[in-house]
Amino acid sequence: MKLLKFPYYVQTEILDNIEHSNLFWLSFVSKNIKSLIKSSQAKRFRSISRIVYESFRDKPIVSIHFKTKNKEGTKDVLKKENIIGVFGVYREYESDCFQLNVAGKMIDFRMSHYYSFPEACFHRHDKESVIESIHNYVFDFFGDTVEHIWEASFPELFIPDLPNLSLWITIWSEDWEIIDRKRDLKNREKFFASIPVLKNITMDTSEPFSPESKFYQAESIRIFQSHYPSVQAFLRNFKGRQATLSHCQCDFMELMMFMNRWRSGEAFQNVEYLKIELYGGRLQNQVLNVNWVKHIDATKTPPTHSVLDLSAPDPALKPNTDPIASHSYIVREADSRVASVSVQGQTFSFGVWKETEEQFLRMVKTMKLSKYPYLVQKEILDDMKNADLFWLSFVSKNMKTLIKSSQVKRFQSISRIMYHSSFGDKRIVSIPFKTKNRKGTEDILELEGIMGIFGDCKASEDDCFQLNVSGKIIDFRLSNQYTFPEACFHPNDKESAIESIHNYFLNFFGNTMEYIWRAKHPEDIIPHLSNLSLWISIWPNLSQVIDLKNLEKFFASTPVLKNITMKLDKSEPFSPESKFYQAETISIFHQRSKSVHALLRHFQGRQATLFYCEVDMLELIEFLNRWRSGEALQKLEYLKIILRRDGPWHWQPHEILNANWVKHIESTKKPPIHSVANLYTPGPDYKPNTNPITSHTYVVRKTDNRVASISVQEGDFVFGVWKETEKEFLRMVE
């Protein structure tokens, strides 16, 4: 096919369907072909977000990053196309090389044995000139609308100094515990001094750099696990535009000093965006309570700050920094420019506007949600947090109805709402949800706080506001410690206030999720309310002694418990009639032999885990026999017993599994894996199921032919009941 003989529109149609990498190599055919590709693909090339030289052991691969759709066409995804390898190590005897004129320099290429694209090969002393020529050609071909980035990991010390090429450096300590920190810091200082100013640095550090270090001049910096001295030095010396500090140590005084230095014009002239995420602890709202921090009226909607993210993994998918929509801001004295300031739990966010205070305040809006069409209303509400929706529902009955109707599906996806202890008998109401850790490698559990139930209302407090909560007027105040309001009331109103709050939650979020009251005995109150599961923790310290009689009275006075977690060193068991045995799930630590014996005989719940307990082989055989006969343990789904590692408590697996009523699956076959919904997971979306049991041994219940898998290893006994009969169970064996 002779492309140049076709009409221009046909040429364009053909080129539109060729991948970027093939277009790149096609451009070497002739100057006319190169000009044709550049003219016909100008719009397409402008949609490329980045061209990246990803250096690995000083061997960069040049790739194109651009946005496209997933296979279903429903979602934007990032696509990366590799174009060329710059690998070097040229050998004279290589016969599969071909030469190309690359920006005026003849360079040898060869087809790769590992990749689907050619590799440039050259003598080591030609490296800099070859990379310069390749960069010049790539820049000329794809144009200057694309950002060209050289990515390298320290200590790969080859860093080209070329125009129109941004430098991104990543520095990770492989083992921070054993590394020579001072020597490592000096090496890093020398490295930064030897290279051009960087576009982006991503690193971990616990030692501060010197105030003169070029490290602080980088346009954008991301730091992980930084200790207090490093954060302090950073907040005093940073000269770049954007920074994110994750998992770090910082106090509110340092943040106030940073804001004051920006406000006075003394430093941070270039700063556009700063985000600090603490490791442990919470930022106090004292940061926002100084007299030079200004506040927008709570009834108005502040403008949302967001700027182009200089260190975004790919700007085509997430081009901007995290939005800051805060009612608090400060003004720089020198030019009246504004910076929005947000303190949310463990996160401090600071965003600088181009606008002066006068221009900024013109952007503040009094939003009347009811005036928008329903689809626009829903879109707005979809982007709000659950906590904000909850408080917005108090505006009016119509607003509450709108939120409930538009967020039905979202509320149904909530698995739990937790009332858990803060300190003393004070509560926080929160929604647990699953998210990723800072590196995106592991699931972790987070809590979205909705409100506090703190009591102790003082008549002199003038910062309270009142709301009608399920027909009861309750005082609330803004917290100095948390980002959500607290209910405050007199002690004699506690029960009725908690009941009204719970009824409001139940009416607003619905009854598709589980409501859990987590309490410590004997410190916390135990409410008796509908649709509220009780989780009790009994964990005495070394100086405390558990009084079983009082504990029996406590269990007798409460509704049936959803969960009990306790440490029990007592040798005497609870009475057979105790409501303790009726709990749906039990986790017990350090249980004595008599207590284990009683639990295995009288437990009426669904799941139990016994940690570091005393139990002998005969007890387990008796337990299995009683379940098998149908005499007891009808509701049991899962049981795990972990023996104490000290003393005489041990067993041999064959002593339990060789009973003639224990059945065995052939060792050549694969047994089914038992796992059921974990009733005691911190969040059902986080670790939803019990630990899997894969065992070749099982027992069958006589009354209904149902099966239970048994796993016995030294120190561990695990028992899992199937819904299937033996016949159905054996069909699952592979």
Image (cartoon, rainbow, N blue to C red):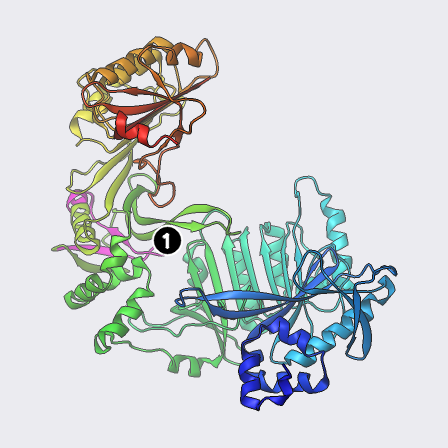
Where's residue 227, x and y in %?
60, 49
Whether residue 585 is visible, yes or no, is no
Residue at image point 33% right, 52% down = 449
Residue 481: in magenta span = yes
Quadrant where the C terminus sits is: top left
Q: Is residue 98 left or right of residue 508?
A: right
- Residue labelled with disc 1: 482
Residue at image point 33% right, 78% down = 365
Where's residue 552, x and y in %?
21, 21
Q: Is residue 656 left or right of residue 278?
A: left
Quadrant where the N terminus sits is: bottom right
Q: What range is drawn magenta here? A: 472-496
Where's residue 368, x and y in %?
25, 76
Q: Total of numbered circles in the picture?
A: 1
Residue 450 to residue 643: above or below: below
Residue 672: in magenta span = no
Q: Residue furthest left?
A: 471
Q: Is residue 686 left or right of residue 468?
A: right
- Describe the element under mark 1 as helix, strand or loop: loop
Q: Quadrant of residue 58?
A: bottom right
Along the line of sight, the residue nearer the viewer: 84 or 677: 84
